[in-house]
Amino acid sequence: MRINSYNPVEASYNKSILITGAAGFTGTFLTKRLLEKNCKVKVLAMDNLENLKHFRGKISLIRGNICNSPKNLLKDMDVDFHLAAITRVTGCIKYSHEAFVKVK
């Protein structure tokens, strides 16, 4: 018996997509998959930009973080995959103001 389930990645094919945290482990794989499915991909990334070098010319890259992103970031986007996160203690120390004080 097959259970029908909603797959947000498959539902996003051929659409305009924003991915926050696209330079992270999960974000790079999602970016690759969506580009393979003819999506127009815009990414917001703060660091680890070398992880996105394979996508140059295929994505629209905005360097920044979710605390100071442009107000029109979601304009003309059909879907937003929010993957941005501080994943290590060292990241929390480096970005302590953004992580613990600045809430948007």
Image (cartoon, grey):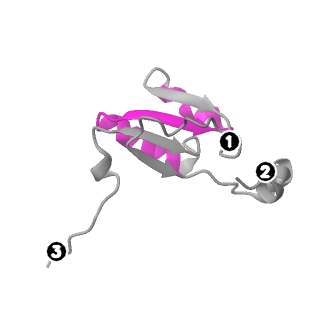
Query: Closer to us: mark 3 or mark 2?
Result: 2
Q: Main secondary structure of the magenta part?
A: helix
In the image, is 81 to the left or to the right of 68?
Answer: left
Q: Residues within 10 Å of mark 1 (few under 14, many from 20)?
A: some
**In 3D space, how far apart are the residues under numbered discs 3 and 2 (Cα atoms)?**
44 Å
- Please give the residue where the numbered disc 2 appears in the rendered image: 98
Q: Which residues are magenta?
A: 26-55
Looking at the image, the residue that sits furthest to the left is 1
**Of callouts 3 and 2, the N-terminal one:** 3
Q: Is residue 24 magenta?
A: no
Disc 3 is placed on an element classified as loop
Could you tell me which residue is drawn at 42 percent across and 39 percent down? Answer: 77
The numbered mark at residue 2 is 3
Figure quadrant of residue 92: bottom right
- Please give the residue where the numbered disc 1 appears in the rendered image: 65
| Looking at the image, residue 102 lies above or below residue 36 | below
Could you tell me which residue is drawn at 16 percent across and 74 percent down? Answer: 2
**In 3D space, how far apart are the residues under numbered discs 1 and 3 (Cα atoms)?**
40 Å
